[in-house]
Amino acid sequence: MDVHFFKDYIELSQEVKDALEAKKPVVALESTIITHGMPYPENVKTALEVEKIIRDNGAVPATIAIMNGVIKVGLTEKEIRDLASQKHVIKTSRRDLPIILAKKLYGATTVAGTMLIANMVGIRIFVTGGIGGVHRGATETMDISADLMELARTNVAVVCAGAKSILDIGLTLEYLETHGVLVLGYQTDKFPAFYTRSSGFDVDYRVDSLEEMAKIMEFKWKMDLQGGIVIANPIPRQYALNDEFINGSIEAALMEAKENGITGKAVTPFLLDKLKQITEGKSLSANIELVKNNAQVGSKLAVEYAKMFQ
């Protein structure tokens, strides 16, 4: 990367910069959860609580976003609140970055966008809610999240509660397998489905200790096996939703989206909002708790991984 570009368009917070230079544990966080994933004020409250969880577990949080055409790695509390208050924030994946930087816009990074930027600055662990994937009906629409291709080529481990239940999880896992993306289950044999602990599909390998997980990461990238790792971490049992209930709710929401001609980027926020209504807020509560749980695991993993370089 052009060194002048890095200096002019990527801004690391002092906390993140110091941690990376000292090879201390750093955890990347996305920003679409603030702008598109949750309503106000739950979005700001959750973002700040997740950062606190990461700090409490010995790592440094690095929430990533684009503000006025500058990539920010490690938002301040004021910047998080500012981002949440903006009316025009673009969901930012790989394809969107040049436009947002050139036009000096605001952008909230998706899983793919966050992975890309984290990799640019040398952050290897990223905590999110759930990854994107192959959408239902993709054999006709070809609607496949850019998250999957980013996982195929970008060296970042993504701690998540699996893939959102609104997706075709079987095809999502097939896609990841085709592109050589390792899918690990943290203390589980089953791939979780965001709101529920199991999608019915198996992970590639179960890993029960974070020390072993860190070693797997080290071996993969030392061998120059390019691409990310999906670390599937199920939602805590006490917050999981009933499988039949959530799947029925998703089917109803998908039908409404189709009837209203909602497609592309607009589908996920529409479905999440409808699920919140249908489940009387239970889906939002589950979303918040699974992200916090992922932050616990991701920060502890970052501490283990950092030990490799001390």
Image (cartoon, rainbow, N blue to C red):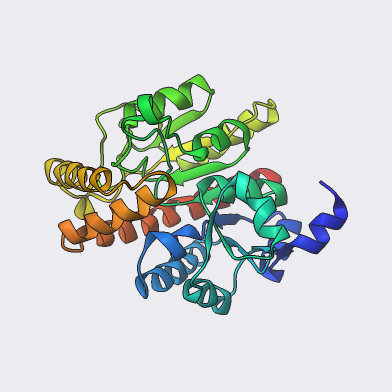
Q: Using the rendered image of the protein, determine whether residue 8 is visible from the camera's viewpoint.
A: yes
Residue 230: where, in percent of width, then height? 47, 37
Depth check: 62 or 244 in front?
A: 244
Q: Position of residue 244 (x, y in %)?
A: 12, 41
Q: Quadrant of residue 23?
A: bottom right
Work out whether residue 212 can be spotted: no
For residue 230, above or below residue 92: above
Residue 228 is situated, as x and y percent measured from the top left of the image, at 57, 35
Specify whether 167 is left or right of 83: left
Residue 218 left/right relative to 52: right
Please tell me which residue is depicted at 81% across the width and 46% down the height of the picture: 1
Q: Residue at x 55, y 35 (%)?
A: 151
Q: Position of residue 14 (x, y in %)?
A: 71, 70
Identify which residue is drawn at 32% across, 44% down. Answer: 234
Residue at the spot 39% in from the left edge and 31% down from the top edge: 141
Decide if residue 178 is on the left or right side of residue 242: right
Q: Where on the picture, by quarter, is residue 77?
A: bottom right
Query: Camera-side residue: 88 or 28?
Result: 88
The number of numbered badges drawn on the structure is 0
Query: Which quadrant of the structure image shows residue 251?
Result: top left
Residue extending farthest to the top is 178
